[in-house]
Image (cartoon, grey):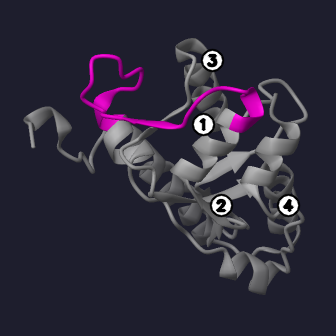
Amino acid sequence: MDPGSAWEPDHPVRAARVAIDRLVLGAAEREVRSAVLCDSLIYGQGRGPGRDSVLIAALVRQARAGGVVRHVGPGRNIWSTVHVDDVADLYLLALEKTPPGAFYFVENGEESFGTIAEAIARSLGLPGPRPWDPAALDNVWDPQFARHALGSNSRVRARRARDLLGWDPRHRSITDWILRELR
């Protein structure tokens, strides 16, 4: 492994997320009903400005620009997913019911990046998906991001949100949403 591809647990993005989570959870010491909601891959259309999901929109931009949908490596890596409307419902429940200092994972299913890429290709009428190497010259992603995010797993379970807050997500499948809604 080359030095530029090493996993960096202290990367500024990860360090900032940990600091924010600790700040929110620490507010419980001051009797603030605070909670951290930790999701993996949010999909769906938001209701305000910036309506597109970050990761799906970026994958679509890459696919349209290159004329083919791509995934890192064989596409067998799996991510937990959740629809933006279900995330909004969970935020409301957390505001109403959470005890101080709570932490909840957020998901309502999971899918492989290969299957997500296949659904994007079908929805956009593009060939693919095709694997690509994060170190390739035509890689549109930062090689570390491609290898350690798009090429890895990101799996969580939202048991506490369901059990403690009564969260009951309505949307069940990112691929169904992509095939029905993404154009």
Question: Which label's residue is closer to the chain start, 1 or 3?
Answer: 1
Q: Does residue 117 appear anywhere in the picture? A: yes
- Give the residue at mark 1: 55
Neighbourhood count class around disc 4 (C-alpha, 10 Å): few under 14, some 14–19, many 20 upward: some
Task: Name the side, left or right, on which 102 lies relative to 149.
Answer: right
Neighbourhood count class around disc 1 (C-alpha, 10 Å): few under 14, some 14–19, many 20 upward: few
- Give the residue at mark 4: 171
Q: Does residue 12 appear anywhere in the picture? A: no
Determine the CA span between mark 2 and mark 4.
18 Å
Determine the CA span between mark 4 and mark 1.
18 Å
| Tag 2: amino acid | Leu
| Tag 3: amino acid | Arg
Q: Where residue 61 sits: x, y (%)?
A: 62, 20
Q: Nearer the viewer, mark 2 or mark 4?
A: 4
Q: Which residues are magenta?
A: 122-145
- Give the residue at mark 3: 64
Task: Name the side, left or right, on which 130 lies relative to 40.
Answer: left
- Give the residue at mark 2: 37
Q: Nearer the viewer, mark 2 or mark 1?
A: 1
Neighbourhood count class around disc 3 (C-alpha, 10 Å): few under 14, some 14–19, many 20 upward: some
